[in-house]
Image (cartoon, rainbow, N blue to C red):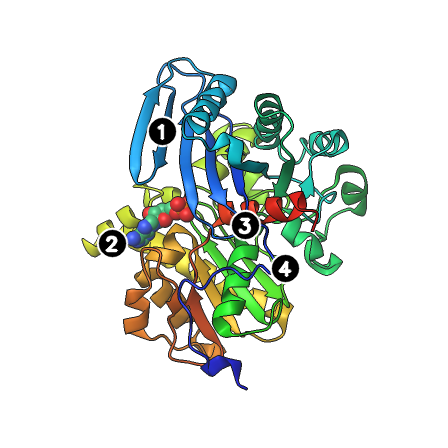
Amino acid sequence: MNPFVLPVLPGAPCRAPCVPTMNILVLNCGSSSAKFAVIDSASGIERLTGIAQRLGSPEASLDYSHSGQKHSQNLPGADHERGLRAAVQVMDDLGLRQSLGGVGHRVVHGGAKFAHSTRITPDVVAQVEACIHLGPLHNPPNLLGIRLAQHLLPGLPQVAVFDTAFHQTMPARAYTYPVPHQWLEQHDVRRYGFHGTSHRYVAQKAQEMLGFAAGQGCLVTAHLGNGCSATAVRDGQSVDTTMGLTPLEGLVMGTRSGSVDPALVGYVARATGQSADAVLDALNKKSGLLGLSGLSNDMRTLQEAAAQGNPRALLAIEVFCYVLAKQLAGLVVALGRLDALVFTGGIGENSAEIREKVVGLLGFLGLQLDPAANAQAVRGKAGRITASTAPQALVVPTNEERMIALDTASLVAGQ
Ligand code: AMP
């Protein structure tokens, strides 16, 4: 049977054989916020979602949503512990705490130590600590979230789900930088890749939509949000990705430049009298769509400005799409053939205009847009957006929290 003629099944459940049914608390602890969700692992139903934010400031608050109702509590001056304690109190009040089967933590950097999600033990905590030099901004708050959850929810199994783990299947030719080899041996300088939980989730969904057997097919997944990365997925495994040692490499993003000539750092530092660190900071926080347009890092704002003829917004969108198409085509080299290109993330799921431009630039691969289908696949709707049957382009809304809940439930159940 030709898998390309099978209908796309919008909203088909994630293929997860024998997923144990339990409520999982998914926790994503950042430097000044802690996002949380209580998710039924089998159905994916979100029983509670919320965020403790602006932690450490007078404006700290807990905002959450339950049964379609939004609630907010002011927590002036609250730190992470007070914010999470308040979240646990909400779970208590709603009778959800007793139903929890485990806690799944998003952990950004697992280095080369973690190729899979894992039950958290003292040894795992020590290994995540040993990756702090690779993820200095993210791993410390992730570890704080683990410690607080262990303290506030004693006895519950805890699981770490890493942004980097999915990319540990990349071959050496894809992860090794052409730099002095002792940088790798002594300082772990190599490509790791990020957004792995999202790429893994949408690749699984795309396989279902295409009617492929589990873990089959040659896909390029494009996660386009404020951060952007793309991954070549062959038979369910990441074989190359655009982000590298840090999330700065690769595609043009909201405020990150993506790949630029590394000599630019020293040149701009000398030309402007800034330190190399200040230039790197600007490449992370003042570049990308924001730097190109001088207006905003938000694609919606740029599309509106471009429609009014703003030349910098037009240029920003053009550079974004051109660099994206060029790197997507490059990833096909890692696969040898393309079955489907998958769009996800805020821009990938909602901007029919960006998808149209990118698919247009990739027409030489055989992709041919279906404009009506493309216009319809917005606001959380999955679907095929090409008239071509091989390769296809799909829109697949991502759901990293669901993936974390699935991994956690499977590990808790001992699978
Ligand atoms: P994320 O980081 O995944 O939340 O994605 C944020 C990005 O998605 C921002 O650049 C938003 O402007 C963009 N985005 C969200 N909705 C739309 C839309 N309807 N059209 C274009 N871009 C959108």
Dot 3 falls on a residue whose secondary structure is helix
Marks 4 and 1, Cα distance to the nearest angstrom?
38 Å
Task: Give the percent coordinates (x, y) of residue 206.
Answer: 50, 66
Front in this rendered view, residue 289 or 96: 96
Query: Which circle's residue, 3 or 4, is located before the other in the chain?
Result: 4
- How crowded pointer 2 is (Cα within 10 Å; few <14, some 14-19, many 20+) is rated as some
Q: Evaluate if marks 4 and 1 touch, with contact meaning CB atoms under 8 Å apart.
A: no
Residue indicated by mark 1 = 63
Dot 2 falls on a residue whose secondary structure is helix
Left or right? Give the position of 205 relative to 348.
right
Task: Give the percent coordinates (x, y) of residue 53.
Answer: 41, 26
Q: Evaluate if marks 2 and 1 touch, with contact meaning CB atoms under 8 Å apart.
A: no
Marks 3 and 4, Cα distance to the nearest angstrom?
21 Å
Residue indicated by mark 4 = 240
Residue indicated by mark 3 = 403
Front in this rendered view, residue 376 or 283: 376
Q: Which residue occupies 40% across, 16% down?
A: 57
Look at discs 2 and 3 and give the one toward the viewer. 3
Query: Which circle's residue, 2 or 3, is located before the other in the chain?
Result: 2
Q: Which amino acid does label 3 sit on?
A: Met
Q: Evaluate if marks 3 and 4 touch, with contact meaning CB atoms under 8 Å apart.
A: no
Task: Give the percent coordinates (x, y) of residue 13.
Answer: 47, 61
265 w.r.t. 386: above or below: above
Query: Which circle's residue, 4 or 2, is located before the other in the chain?
Result: 4
- How crowded pointer 4 is (Cα within 10 Å; few <14, some 14-19, many 20+) is rated as many
Q: Which amino acid does label 2 sit on?
A: Ala
Look at discs 3 and 4 and give the one toward the viewer. 3
Dot 1 falls on a residue whose secondary structure is strand
Marks 4 and 2, Cα distance to the nearest angstrom?
33 Å
